[in-house]
Each structure stands twice: as structure tokens, then as C-alpha cells.
Image (cartoon, rainbow, N blue to C red):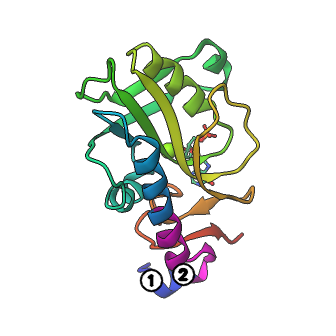
Amino acid sequence: MNESMTDVRDRVRTIFEPDAIQRRVRQLGEEIGAYYADRNDLLILGTLKGSFMFMADLVRHVTIPHEMDFVGAASYGKSKTSSGHVRLFYDPVTTMSGRPVLLLEDIVDTGHTLQNLVHLLQTREPASLDICTLLHKRKSHLDLEPRFVGFDAPDEFLVGYGLDYAEQYRYLPFVGSLKDG
Ligand code: IMP
Ligand code: MG
């Protein structure tokens, strides 16, 4: 059966409106620019695919020159997270060694993937490694806490603005929670 945009929007309860997201993303960009102002060679690394929209909006407000790339990571599974296993389905071609790297995440939930990814990226010996996440559910225990957080998020399943449910909803300009049923 064909589904309309009205059907889609009926199923998502808006939590962060487009205007609120844009305002916060602009602030974050300026904060990031100020934080890295006296550093050279900033590399902004977006996690695929969820951070693509956040990345596109954010870099327009980062007030210093920088490069960007993406990283695609999948954890092997919960049982192996303590050993730090993470599989890269896209390994950035950009050199990380000796330069400041800012990892952009869409959302931190359990933090398992991020934890593993951080450990892997540290083996590439960046000059510094920091995390910026648009959304943080504040229920994880990370060795490296995000330095920049867009919004604290409720512990619900969120979609839109890059976030998906079974690859759906990424294109929505707002973030909302999926209604039951
Ligand atoms: P974590 O390892 O549990 O922190 O989450 C790993 C990834 O799962 C995140 O980077 C997201 O891509 C995805 N994820 C976690 N929570 C949500 C959510 O509420 N909606 C959509 N994707 C999510
Ligand atoms: Mg993600």
C-alpha cells in the first residue's frame, strides 16, 4: 500500500522542531569554532549514516577552516563490546595522525558503538579526539564523554534529522519519537 507524508507525520510525535534544531546547531558550530580556534588541521568526522544531516548543517557554522570525512562503524555485538571490537564499513581515507579530530554522532544511547569506535580511532593517534553529539540520552557510561551536546534526549526511540527506524524517516527536518502501533 502506498504511504503518504501525512501518514508518516501522523506516526511521529515531534520533540525537536526544525527551528530549534537549527538554532542549536548554529550555536554548536560557533562553540566548536571557538574551541579549536588556535589549532590547525581540524578534521570533523561524521558517523554514517545518522549524522549526515547534522554534519551538513553544522559545518556551515563552524567558524574556522576544517576538513571533513565520514566513518562507518558497526559493533560485532553486545557480548564483544568489552573487547572493543568494531567493524568499519567505511574507513576514512583522511589522515588522523597528529591532528585534532572531532567525531560527530547523531545520538548516544547505550554508547557501545561509540565506546568501541573511540578506542579504534585512538589507535590512529590523533593529536586530540573529542565527541560532538546532537542528542544524548544520558544513560551511557563512556570513557570519553561528549564535549559538545546538542540536546538531552528522552529515552524513547527517536527518528528524523538523520535518525532512522529500519532506514525510514531519515529525511524528516525534525526529530520525533515513533508512536506505538
Ligand atoms: P548506541 O551504541 O546504543 O549508543 O547507539 C548506536 C547507534 O544506534 C546510534 O549511533 C544510532 O545510529 C542508533 N540509535 C540509538 N538510539 C537511537 C534512536 O533512538 N533512534 C534512532 N537510532 C538510534
Ligand atoms: Mg549512528
Vertical comparison of 113 with 19: above or below: above
Q: Are the residues flagged by discs 2 and 1 in contact, CB closer than 8 Å? A: yes
As measured in the structure, the alpha-carbon distance from the residue carrying label 2 to the one carrying label 1 is: 6 Å
Amino acid residing under circle 2? Arg
**Quadrant of the drawing holding the C terminus:** bottom right
Question: For residue 24: magenta?
Answer: yes
Hey, which quadrant is residue 94 in on the image?
top left
Question: For residue 15: magenta?
Answer: yes
Residue at 76% x, 43% y is 139
Q: Name the residue under label 2.
A: 9
| Residue 4 place in picture, x, y as percent | 43, 84
Q: Is label 2 in a helix, a strand or a loop?
A: helix
Residue at 36% x, 61% y is 61
Between 156 and 56, the residue placed more toward the observer is 56
| Residue 88 place in picture, x, y as percent | 38, 26
Between 13 and 36, the residue placed more toward the observer is 36
Q: Is label 1 in a helix, a strand or a loop?
A: helix
Instruction: Residue 106: give its label.
Output: none
Residue 36 appears in the rendering: yes
Mark 1 Cβ and ligand 1 under 8 Å apart: no
Q: Is residue 156 left or right of residue 18?
A: right
| Residue 153 place in picture, x, y as percent | 69, 58
Between 94 and 11, the residue placed more toward the observer is 94
Q: Give the range drawn in magenta.
A: 10-25
Q: In this view, does 9 lie to the left or right of 110?
A: left
Residue 167 appears in the rendering: no
| Residue 174 place in picture, x, y as percent | 51, 73
Instruction: Residue 5: give its label.
Output: 1
Amino acid residing under circle 1? Met
